[in-house]
Image (cartoon, rainbow, N blue to C red):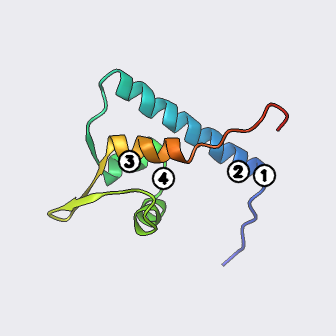
Amino acid sequence: MPTSIITTDDLREFKMELLDAIKTLLAKQSKGQLKRYLKSSEVMDLLQLSPGTLQNLRINGTLPYSKVGGIIYYDAEEIQEVLTKNRIQHGLNS
């Protein structure tokens, strides 16, 4: 399997994509368009995550979830809390 090297530019691009997803999430929530509970596919679309990444976020406890009848649901407010809690702010000189 080939090795991938992640550069600081890759990390910046990921950060910008994540911030865009957060802005979309907040905009939808402020307009009342966001459902309270989201299925895995909806979370993957919203945050542009792969199934494996979403599973890792569940396994390591980053993203809380509920499982009902084999379907996994995520509370939209809890997703927003996780994103807000993990927000990184850099100074103007960074």
> In terms of secondary structure, where does tag 2 sit?
helix
The residue indicated by pointer 2 is 11
Q: Residue 49 has which mark?
A: 4
> In terms of secondary structure, where does tag 4 sit?
loop
Indicate whether 61 appears above or below 18. below
Q: Residue 43 has which mark?
A: 3
Q: CA distance from mark 4 to mark 3?
A: 8 Å
Which residue is rendered at x = 40% and y = 46% of the image? 79
> In terms of secondary structure, where does tag 1 sit?
helix
Q: CA distance from mark 4 to mark 1?
A: 20 Å
The residue indicated by pointer 1 is 8
Which residue is rendered at x = 72% and y = 51% of the image? 10
Which residue is rendered at x = 31% and y = 32% of the image? 34
User: Which quadrant of the structure image shows residue 94?
Assistant: top right
Q: Earlier in the sequence, mark 2 or mark 4?
A: 2
Residue type, numbered disc 4: Leu
- The reply to whether the C-beta atoms of the residues labelled 2 and 4 are less than 8 Å apart is no
Indicate whether 35 appears above or below 44. above
- The reply to whether the C-beta atoms of the residues labelled 2 and 1 are less than 8 Å apart is yes
- The reply to whether the C-beta atoms of the residues labelled 4 and 3 are less than 8 Å apart is yes
> In terms of secondary structure, where does tag 3 sit?
helix
Q: CA distance from mark 2 to mark 1?
A: 5 Å
